[in-house]
Structures are given as structure tokens and as C-alpha cells.
Image (cartoon, rainbow, N blue to C red):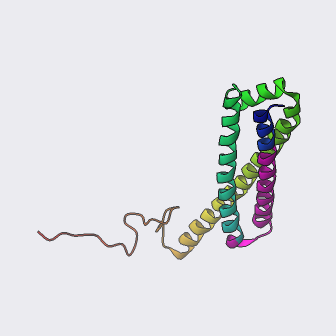
Amino acid sequence: MNDTLAQLHASLHQETELVQDFIKVLEAETLALTEGGGEQALAESTALKNNYAEELAKLSERRQALLTQLGYSADKAGLDSVAQGHPALQAACRQLYDKARQANELNASNGIIIDTFMAHNQQALETLRMLAGAGNLYDASGRTHAGAKGQTRNIKAG
């Protein structure tokens, strides 16, 4: 295995380990969502996920540069091709694909849970507004609606 292939192999292992760590953050986020971990736990999870996303992007750029250096396209097809031509890379590629798929599924599942919570919260707010007789004072992003009680108008004097 030449030096660039060895670097690619090491990079794939490093990327796989980072995706595995990312999965642990996603699993903790799932627990916070399903067991009521609170907004602090979700804020920490979001910050960690953003850090991992940045690190994964850097490793992805490194992998793409190594693929290009080896004469392959800097995408999944290029990675598949290099693994076909160099069997020593096949297991590392397969592990990365498996972990990436697992992370994607967990992240999508957490997104569905968050969307469901947001919809329930919005419905609860609407019910409270109706019970209080306040009508639609605010929209989903917290902005006041035109014509809402207590809203002032800007009037210019000539």
C-alpha cells in the first residue's frame, strides 16, 4: 500500500471513529427527547452536534483530497472505485458507510420527535389563546399579528 493509500486508510478510520462519537451524541439526544432531559440537555446536544459536523466536514475534505490525489473522483463513486481497486480499503469503507447510515437514521428520527413536540406545543398555545379569549396574538415565530389587542400604530405627524 503506497503512502497516499495508507493516509486514506487512516483517514477513513479516523472519520469512522468520529461518526461513532457523533452517534453517541445523537443517542444522548434521543434520551433527552424521550425521557424529558430538558432544554439544557438539548442545547448541549446541539452544540456538540455542530462541533462534530465541523470536524466531520474537515475529515471529509481530507478524504476527498486524498481521493483526488489518487486519481479518483472526490465523491462516493470515487471511494467505491478506490475500494474496488484496493481490497485493503473495503472494510474501512464499509464501516464508514454503516456508521454514517446509522447516524443519518438517528438524526432523522430525532428530527421527527422534535417536529412532533413543536406541533404539540403550537397546538397547546393555540388552545390557551382561545381559552383566554386573546385570539391569535402571536404567530409560530413569536411575531405579533396585525390587529392584535394592545398593538399600537405608528402615526406620523405632518
Q: Position of residue 66 (x, y in %)?
A: 70, 35
Q: Position of residue 10 (x, y in %)?
A: 80, 43
Frontmost residue, 25 versus 39: 25
Extreme-left residue of the structure: 158
Tell whether 120 sits left or right of 91.
Answer: left
Magenta extent: 13-40
Residue 76 among those drawn in magenta: no
In the displayed structure, 100 sits above or below 22; it is above
Q: Residue 130 falls in which quadrant of the image?
A: bottom right
Residue at 70 percent across and 53 percent down: it is 111
Residue at 36 percent across and 72 percent down: it is 151
Residue 27 among those drawn in magenta: yes
- Which SS type dominates the magenta stretch? helix
| Image quadrant containing the C terminus | bottom left
In the displayed structure, 149 sits above or below 52; it is below
Q: Position of residue 15 (x, y in %)?
A: 76, 46
